[in-house]
C-alpha cells in the first residue's frame, strides 16, 4: 500500500514537473566568452510553447558586425504531452582582436520586454577547426551537420529593382504629372525578399521626393499589394509603395533625387535540411534613378494666371425648358474631366439684363486611379427671368481653360435654351428690391437739418472768422495813420 502511494505521488510530481516545463518561457542565450577572430558570436532567443510573432532589433556590440538572423523551431511529444520552442539567432562577426563588452540590454518579444545582463567577450587569434570533434552518428542520416557546426548560407542572384517613375518629363504650369515608387521582381527571380519597415522608410523618402510649390493628390496606398505588369515583353510583379499626382503652381525645374530602398534579402542554406533554419536574414539596398521635370509657362492669354489646366467637358442637367416670368428654376453647370478638380473656379457670369442669379452651391467628386486624377465639379445656380422671350444660357455663362494635350485655350459654354412666357415682371422685381445705401438709413437718422454737434462746430467757425476780420481791420487802420 505504501509502495503504491509512493508511486502515485512520484507520477503526480513528474506530471507537475512536465507541466511546468511546458509552460511558456523566454530564454536569452549568449555565445561563449572567448572566440577566435574567424568565428562568430551569437545571441539566441528561445520562446517556449508559442510562436515568435514580432521581435525588436538585437543590440549592437562594439567592433562586431551583424551577419544576419536565422530562425528555427522544434517540437517534442513526451507521454502524450506536446511542447514546442521557437528560436531566433543573431550572428555577429568580430572585426579585430581584444576584449569587448556587450552591455545589458532589453529585447521585445511579442510585445513583452526581456532582459539580459550582457557579458565581456574576448576575441583572440583565428582558430583552426578541431580534428578531435566527435562526429554525430545521425548527421548523415538526417542530412545535417553536428550541432557545433554552423550551416553555410549563400546569397542567390536576384532579378529585382526599385523604381521612381514619372509619366511626364515636361508639363505646363497647372498640368499634373504622376509620380510612383515601386519595387519590382521578375517571374524568374529566385531570391527571397521581404519588406523592411516600409512605413518608416517612406516617411524619410517623401521628405526628399515631394516637390515644393505644388498641389498634391495622394493615392493613399495603405497596403502593399502585388500586381502583374509587362515591361519590354517581360513579366514582373510590381509592389507600389507610393503614388501621387502633383500640379505645379509656377514654372521652373523640379528635381527629384536618387532614392534608396532597403529590403530584407534572405541568404539560403547551401545544404538545406529538415531540421533547423534553411535561410538567414540579410539586407540589400536598391537605388532608383533621379528625375527632372520641366515646368513650362502657359501661352500668353489675359486670363492665363486664373484658368484651370486639363482636359474638360461640360455637363448640364437641362437642355430646353419652358418657364414663366419670375418663376425660379435650378441650373447645374458641371465641369468633368482630367486635371486638378479641386482648383476649378466657377464659370464667368456675363452681365446681361433680365436674368437674376445667386451664388451657386458647389459639389465636387475626385477620383484617383490609373495614374491620373479625374472627377467632376458642379455649380448649381438658382435663376429667375423677369422678361418673356427665348434665353440662350451661352450668352450668360462661360468657362475658359487651357488644354495641354491640344496646347490651346478653350471655352465651355452652356447648350441649354430657356423659353420664358408670361407678363413682364421687371417693375415688380424692382419694387421688391431693397434700394440699400443711403435709403436704408432714412428711418434711423435724425430728421433735423443740423444736430447739436454740428451747431457747435458752425458757431465756433463763425466766431473765428469774426475775430480774424477785426484783427485785419485794426491792421489797416494802423497803416493809414
Image: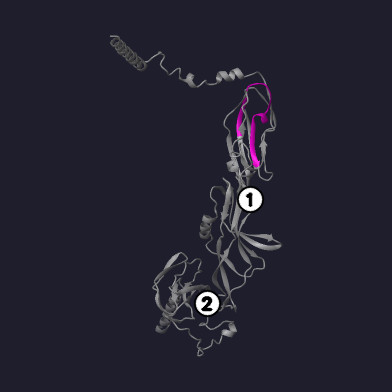
Relative side of 428 to 437, left or right: right
**Which residue does the image show at 53% across and 84% down from the upper left?**
146
Q: Which colour scheme appears in the figure?
A: one colour
What is the x, y in percent for residue 300?
63, 39
Res. 23 mark: none
Q: Toward the viewer: 369 or 146? A: 369
Q: Main secondary structure of the magenta part?
A: strand
Point out the tag, 1 or 2, that comes first from the N-terminus.
2
Relative side of 430 to 408, left or right: left
* Displayed quadrant of residue 413: top right
What is the x, y in percent for residue 16?
43, 75
Q: Toward the viewer: 298 or 472? A: 472
Decide: is 174 above or below 349.
below
What is the x, y in percent for residue 148?
50, 83
Q: Toward the viewer: 350 or 409? A: 409
Q: Are marks 1 and 2 in contact (CB under 8 Å)?
A: no
Q: Residues within 10 Å of mark 1 (few under 14, many from 20)?
A: some
* Displayed quadrant of residue 283: bottom right
Query: Which quadrant, please, contains the N terminus?
Result: bottom left
Decide: is 367 above or below 108.
above
Res. 77 mark: 2
| SS category of the residue bearing label 2 | strand
Cα distance between the residues tagged 1 and 2: 68 Å
Residue picked out by circle 1: 170
* Region of the chain picked out in magenta, as a range: 380-402
Asked if the stretch drawn in magenta spans residue 399, the answer is yes
Amino acid at each position: 500500500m505504501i509502495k503504491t502511494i509512493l508511486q502515485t505521488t512520484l507520477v503526480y510530481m513528474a506530471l507537475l514537473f512536465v507541466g511546468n516545463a511546458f509552460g511558456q518561457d523566454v530564454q536569452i542565450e549568449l555565445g561563449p566568452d572567448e572566440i577566435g577572430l574567424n568565428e562568430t558570436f551569437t545571441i539566441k532567443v528561445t520562446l517556449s510553447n508559442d510562436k515568435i510573432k514580432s521581435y525588436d532589433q538585437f543590440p549592437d556590440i562594439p567592433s562586431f558586425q551583424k551577419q544576419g538572423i536565422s530562425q528555427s523551431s522544434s517540437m517534442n511529444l513526451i507521454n502524450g504531452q506536446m511542447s514546442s520552442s521557437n528560436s531566433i539567432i543573431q550572428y555577429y562577426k568580430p572585426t579585430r582582436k581584444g576584449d569587448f563588452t556587450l552591455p545589458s540590454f532589453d529585447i521585445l518579444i511579442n510585445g513583452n520586454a526581456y532582459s539580459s545582463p550582457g557579458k565581456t567577450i574576448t576575441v583572440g587569434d583565428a582558430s583552426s577547426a578541431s580534428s578531435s570533434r566527435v562526429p554525430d552518428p545521425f548527421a548523415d542520416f538526417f542530412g545535417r551537420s553536428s550541432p557545433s557546426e554552423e550551416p553555410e548560407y549563400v546569397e542567390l542572384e536576384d532579378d529585382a529593382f526599385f523604381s521612381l517613375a514619372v509619366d511626364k518629363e515636361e508639363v505646363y504650369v497647372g498640368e499634373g504629372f504622376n509620380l510612383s515608387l515601386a519595387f519590382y521582381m521578375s517571374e524568374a527571380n529566385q531570391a527571397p525578399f521581404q519588406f523592411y519597415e516600409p512605413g518608416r522608410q517612406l516617411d524619410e523618402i517623401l521628405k526628399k521626393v515631394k516637390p515644393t510649390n505644388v498641389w498634391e493628390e495622394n493615392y493613399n496606398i495603405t497596403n502593399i499589394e502585388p500586381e502583374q505588369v509587362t515591361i519590354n515583353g517581360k513579366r514582373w510583379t510590381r509592389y507600389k509603395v507610393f503614388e501621387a499626382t502633383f500640379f505645379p503652381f509656377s514654372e521652373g525645374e523640379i528635381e527629384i533625387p536618387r532614392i534608396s530602398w532597403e529590403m530584407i534579402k534572405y541568404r539560403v542554406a547551401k545544404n538545406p535540411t529538415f531540421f533547423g533554419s534553411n535561410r538567414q536574414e540579410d539586407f540589400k539596398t536598391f537605388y532608383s534613378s533621379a528625375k527632372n521635370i520641366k515646368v513650362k509657362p502657359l501661352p500668353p492669354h489675359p486670363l492665363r494666371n486664373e484658368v484651370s489646366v486639363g482636359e474638360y467637358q461640360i455637363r448640364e442637367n437641362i437642355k430646353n425648358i419652358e418657364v414663366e416670368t419670375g418663376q425660379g428654376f435650378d441650373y447645374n453647370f458641371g465641369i468633368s474631366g482630367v486635371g486638378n478638380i479641386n482648383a476649378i473656379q466657377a464659370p464667368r457670369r456675363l452681365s446681361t439684363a433680365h436674368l437674376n442669379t445667386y451664388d451657386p452651391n458647389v459639389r465636387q467628386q475626385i477620383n484617383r486611379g490609373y495614374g491620373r486624377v479625374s472627377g467632376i465639379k458642379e455649380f448649381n445656380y438658382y435663376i429667375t427671368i423677369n422678361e418673356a422671350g427665348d434665353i440662350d444660357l451661352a450668352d450668360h455663362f462661360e468657362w475658359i481653360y487651357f488644354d495641354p494635350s491640344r496646347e490651346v485655350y478653350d471655352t465651355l459654354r452652356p447648350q441649354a435654351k430657356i423659353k420664358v412666357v408670361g407678363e413682364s415682371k421687371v417693375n415688380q422685381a424692382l419694387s421688391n428690391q431693397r434700394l440699400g445705401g443711403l435709403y436704408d438709413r432714412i428711418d434711423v437718422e435724425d430728421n433735423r437739418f443740423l444736430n447739436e454737434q454740428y451747431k457747435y462746430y458752425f458757431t465756433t467757425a463763425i466766431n473765428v472768422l469774426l475775430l480774424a476780420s477785426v484783427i485785419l481791420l485794426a491792421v489797416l487802420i494802423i497803416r493809414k495813420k
